[in-house]
Image (cartoon, grey):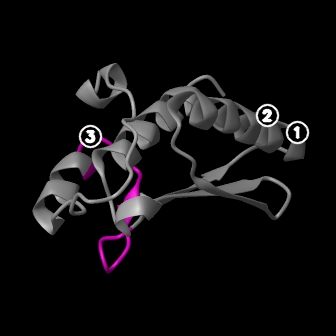
Amino acid sequence: MSELLKKHCQPCEGGLPPLSKEQAENLLKETPGWEINSDYKRINREFKFKDFAEALAFVNKIGALAESEGHHPDILLHGYRHVRIELTTHAIAGLSENDFILAAKIDKILAKF
């Protein structure tokens, strides 16, 4: 089990630097399937489900998780059964550990589908 699953997102009001490229790459190893964008400010992953209902159920579970963690992803449900999730920490205009914590927890939800 990823150590990230044991953690909770911490409030971020800014004032801290975003993760370095090296820090982000190390955390990415704990979240297989996720990709870092070229400027190291966001991570994303694409999911495919059997139908719209399953994709929507997944989105709703992510929404509940995001509320409980206080860290909110960008979610796009498209092509009726595809879901794209993008994570960044807006307050620091880049990546924080929170993004990887939420990614790991999203992957745990996925395992139930």
Q: Amino acid at mark 1?
A: Ala
Q: Is residue 21 magenta?
A: no
Magenta portion: prevailing SS class = loop
Which region is colored magenta? 28-41
Q: Which residue is mark 1?
A: 53
Are the two marked residues, 2 and 1, in contact with CB atoms closer than 8 angstroms? yes
Left or right placement of residue 108 versus residue 76 in this view? left
Q: Which residue is mark 3?
A: 30
Q: Is residue 24 left or right of residue 102?
A: left
- Picture disc at residue 102: none
Residue 7, given in percent of the width and then of the height, sits at 32, 25
Where does the image place residue 59, in percent across and percent down from the top left? Answer: 72, 42
Quadrant of the rendered image containing residue 21: bottom left
Mark linked to residue 57: 2
Q: Label 1 crowding class (10 Å Cα cut-off): few <14, some 14-19, many 20+?
A: few
Indicate whether residue 33 is drawn in magenta: yes
Pick whichever of labels 3 and 1 is earlier in the sequence: 3
Residue at 35% x, 25% y is 5
Q: Quick check: marks 3 and 1 in contact, CB under 8 Å?
A: no
SS at circle 2: helix
In whole angstroms, how far apart are the C-alphas of marks 2 and 1? 6 Å
In space, the residues marked 3 and 2 are separated at their CA atoms by 25 Å
**In this view, 37 is above or below 68:** below
Choose the circle earlier in sequence order: 3 or 2: 3
Residue drawn at x 46%, y 31% as measured from the top left: 105
